[in-house]
Amino acid sequence: MASTMNPAFAYTVVYVRDVAKSVAFYASAFGYNVRRLDHSHKWAELDSGPTTIAFTPLHQRETDDLTGKVQLPDSNGERNPVEICFDYADVDAAYKHAVDNGAAPVSSPEIKNWGQKVGYVRDIDGIVVRLASYVNEPTKSVS
């Protein structure tokens, strides 16, 4: 049965230690433009297409009291239960650029058995970021 609700995936919110530093890091390491950095530094957004990538502090009353406190991994051997994935035409260049701009290398890009080239880094908050080739080349829009 098809849904008649027609939802749109609008935001991914990343909880970070320092909103201004994190949004600046994502801009420099992964090539995004900052769309918005709130004057309070409690909210920032990247210009990332139809789905916004937003940043907010790890702990704040608005979220801790309503939905619970953010739980971080206990060690470097653990990871957050989310992975951020960015697709690039040139994964090797994107990986090098991210590492040169402060991302911690995790795994150099390699071809996976499903044909996608994938590399992993960690951002300045320890969140795993996957840098990958397109699984299927994006379709070009007709002008």
Image (cartoon, rainbow, N blue to C red):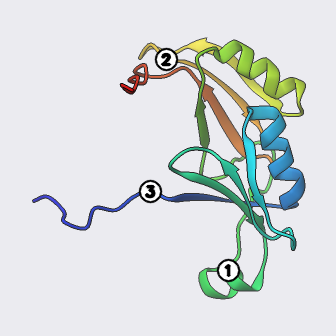
Can residue 125 be seen here? no
Q: First in sequence: mark 3 or mark 1?
A: 3
Can residue 122 be seen here? yes
Label 1 packing within 10 angstroms: few (<14), some (14-19), many (20+): some
Q: Quadrant of residue 71?
A: bottom right
Question: Is label 1 in a helix, a strand or a loop?
Answer: helix
Residue positioned 72% across, 39% down in the render: 32
**Alpha carbon distance from label 2 to label 1:** 36 Å
Amino acid at dot 3: Phe
Residue positioned 75% across, 86% down in the render: 61
Position of 98 relative to 50 (above/below): above
Amino acid at dot 1: Thr
Label 3 packing within 10 angstroms: few (<14), some (14-19), many (20+): few
Q: Which residue is mark 3?
A: 9
Q: Is residue 82 left or right of residue 23?
A: left
Which mark, by number, is residue 116? 2
**Alpha carbon distance from label 2 to label 3:** 24 Å
Q: Is residue 28 left or right of residue 114?
A: right
Q: Is residue 51 left or right of residue 79?
A: left
User: Residue 136 at x, y = what percent?
Assistant: 40, 21
Position of 140 relative to 33 (above/below): above
Residue positioned 28% across, 61% down in the render: 6
Q: Which residue is mark 1?
A: 63
User: Residue 57 at x, y = what percent?
Assistant: 79, 68
